[in-house]
Amino acid sequence: MRFVPEGTFWMGDNKNLSDEQPLHLVSVSPFYMDVYEVHIWHWDKVSNWATENGYEFSIASKDLRKEGPFWYKDNSLLVFPMNMISWYDAIKWCNARSELEGRTPVYYLDSNFSAVYRNGDVDLNASNVKWNATGYRLPTEVEWEYAARDGLYSKLYPWGNFLNGSLSNYYNNGDPFDNSASPVGYFNGYQRIIEAANSFQGEDYKATDQKSSFGIHDLGGNVSEWCWDWYYDEWYSQSAASSVDNRGPSTDFLSPINSGRGVKMTRVVRGGNFRSKPDAEYGNEVRTAYRNFFTPESTQRRVGLRCVRGDNDNDPLWHTAAKISFPNWYYLKWLGYYWHSRFVWVFHTEFGWVYPTGHGSYDNWIFFPKHGWMWTNSYVYPNFYSDKDSAWYQYDTENYEYGWFIKSASGEKKRIGRVYPN
């Protein structure tokens, strides 16, 4: 992820479509945003764990998604952006990613934040969102546009004010993927473009890395991305649209409006995609200010997601551990059983005495008296990173009673010592 600092910017566009008007000032708190759109490999890594831990996702996300073309041998076919996911599945996946990494989930079924959202298609409201949690979530529409503009109003696109096929994956731009998604981050200075209907001489330009000044790729093209907000075409004219960190209209605000129109409420989708047309008659769908929307159950091959999280790492260490019947004994699902003293020292049933520090279950530095400081988390365990020699080691679970670590060296496993004496 990349850090996006706080700021104030002009949102919208007074010169184009009516739902982008009026131009209005909005202030945004700092946050982190994924460098890349969530790709299929990452989706599977999280969703496979999630389905084994009480989550449910729609069939479309598994059976109907579009993967990379058979001829693409430069990298995995699964580094293409995830697609065919509903807004509901995107929200649940954010929660699963949080839980897998040991962060506090963001989305809940109640306003008391006691029931994590893992199943079903539920139209959550802002009161169901723990906005200050450390977990992952979808960006608000304000956050998305602020990141895409780098905070600057004067830019039509994330990269500037002109368009050609070497800058983004949009309709008939000339990339080799035949009006389909390109690998995430493909426009990194090595992109290949040929002459096409909308390449606009991009084939003649020297390819450059198209990450934003915040270091983020594909904010203008490839697949569009789900946002948190409900869509309302006149939202920008409401005073609340200029409030700090606003999260779009509420259901209480929208329900009477939409029922009067006889239409179903929709969620915002932002960013151009491989089907976006740069033609003025379509409103130039590649522009940063362009707003799109779908019903939350919609699944499209041109819509994916990108996660953000707040500038907050304040979860207590191992906060998801469950107390067991013996005083001061706990069980952490990925780490095992341990006894916690009144001080920081911990007696772990396999590690012996260790000294842990860090945040939640995603930032664990553990001091082993025989090894020094080593880092792990729920995502990488039983692998540990050694501060002493800047190398990765694997805890030898087959010989756990001795606490051996294993280091891979030239393809051979090498034991390097015990965590504590027998």
Image: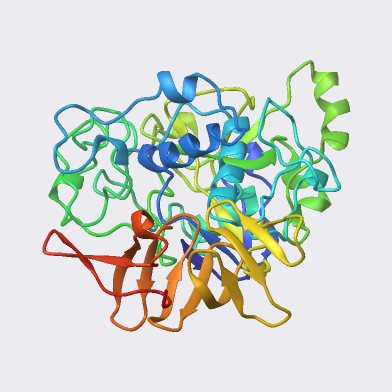
Could one spot residue 345 in this view of the protein? yes
User: Does 2 appear above or below 250?
Assistant: below
Residue sitting farthest toward the front? 422
In percent of width and height, residue 108 lies at 75, 42
> Which one is in front, 358 or 124?
358
In percent of width and height, residue 150 lies at 49, 64
> Which one is in front, 90 or 51?
51
The chosen color scheme is rainbow
> Which one is in front, 17 or 33?
33
Q: Quadrant of residue 87?
A: top right
In percent of width and height, residue 6 lies at 62, 70
Q: Quadrant of residue 292?
A: top right
> Which one is in front, 170 or 92?
92
Residue beneath the point at 44% across and 30% down:
83
Q: Is residue 274 rendered to the left or right of residue 314?
A: left
User: Does 300 appear above or below 139?
Assistant: above
Could one spot residue 64 in this view of the protein? no
Residue beneath the point at 42% across and 62% down:
401
Give the quarter of the figure containing the C terminus. bottom left
Residue beneath the point at 64% across and 49% down:
140
In percent of width and height, residue 372 lies at 41, 83
